[in-house]
Image: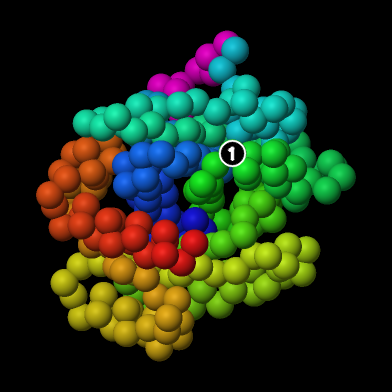
Amino acid sequence: MTNQKGGVGKTTVSVNLSAGLARHLPQARILLVDADPQANATAVFLGIAFAAGPRQPQINTIYELIVQQIPPAQAIQTIPLNNSTSKLDILPAHLDLASAELELVNIFERERRLHRALTPLVDQYDFIIIDCPPSLSLLTINALMAASEVLIPVDPGVFPIIGLNLLNRTIEMVRQANPALRIMGVIPALQDRTALARDTEDQLNEAFGPLLMPPIPRRVAIGEAHAAGMDIFAYQPGSDSAQAFQQLIEEVIQRG
């Protein structure tokens, strides 16, 4: 899940897509990888204190995975989902992940650290979803090197569409080293009932055609769900937000 622009709904989509897949496919194994130093996805499932408070002894995160190269099993945590028997595995982040880029500067093949860490897990999970930081940083490049498919959330406006050109160039550059990488879809996120939102979706449809995926509406309930430590399916299962994410999940399963 990537877009170099912040505030486009990357974490919102990552959280609800991963939780929704775990609910929709109870026999499947789903892993959410939080590669964003803001650690918002981690905060939803493990709490703000885990993501932004003092580090807990003996608790590892993606920082230790990338920088110290510990085995993934020493960092992955299993989260029971509210109002469900389903569970979700998460590779959590902490704010100190921000220092990883500086520490990796002089490391050989630094852009492949996450790929090497996740490769042994590919056969263990049905879906691995990576929430990227809002920048074309070394952490984002690590995520793209580890991924086979990219989902791009886009919020309404002219500038996000312009920014997609830069992201496309980055993906093409990474594809030289990771030929399997492809764009699975572009998600109109944070959509509201405005002319700007409709115009943006029309432009995305013109530019990406069959890659355009079901839109996600802008709703207060989604933010409330995250603040309560829940996905939208637990917080408001009958809402239009939950229905929108359900459509997205079905599209991802079909395309995947």
Which residue in the protein does label 1 denote?
Answer: 124
Region in magenta: 48-57
Q: At x 74% / y 43%, what residue is drawn? A: 116
Numbered label tally: 1
- Asked whether 18 or 10 is in front, the reply is 18
Residue 175 locus on image (x, y percent):
71, 68
Residue 121: x percent and y percent?
A: 63, 39
Question: Are there few (<14), some (14-19), or many (20+) residues within 10 Å of tag 1?
Answer: few
* Residue 46 colored in magenta in the image: no
Q: Residue 159 versus residue 243: which sits nearer the camera?
A: 243
Q: In this rendering, does residue 232 appear at all?
A: yes
54 is within the stretch colored magenta: yes
Going by the picture, which residue comes out furthest to the top?
Answer: 57
Horizontal and vertical percent position of residue 63: 64, 32
Say what secondary structure mark 1 lies in: loop
Q: Amino acid at mark 1?
A: Gln
58 relative to 81, above or below: above
Task: Classify residue 251 as left or right of residue 166.
Answer: left
| Image: 86 above or below 147 | above
Q: Position of residue 154 (x, y in %)?
A: 40, 67
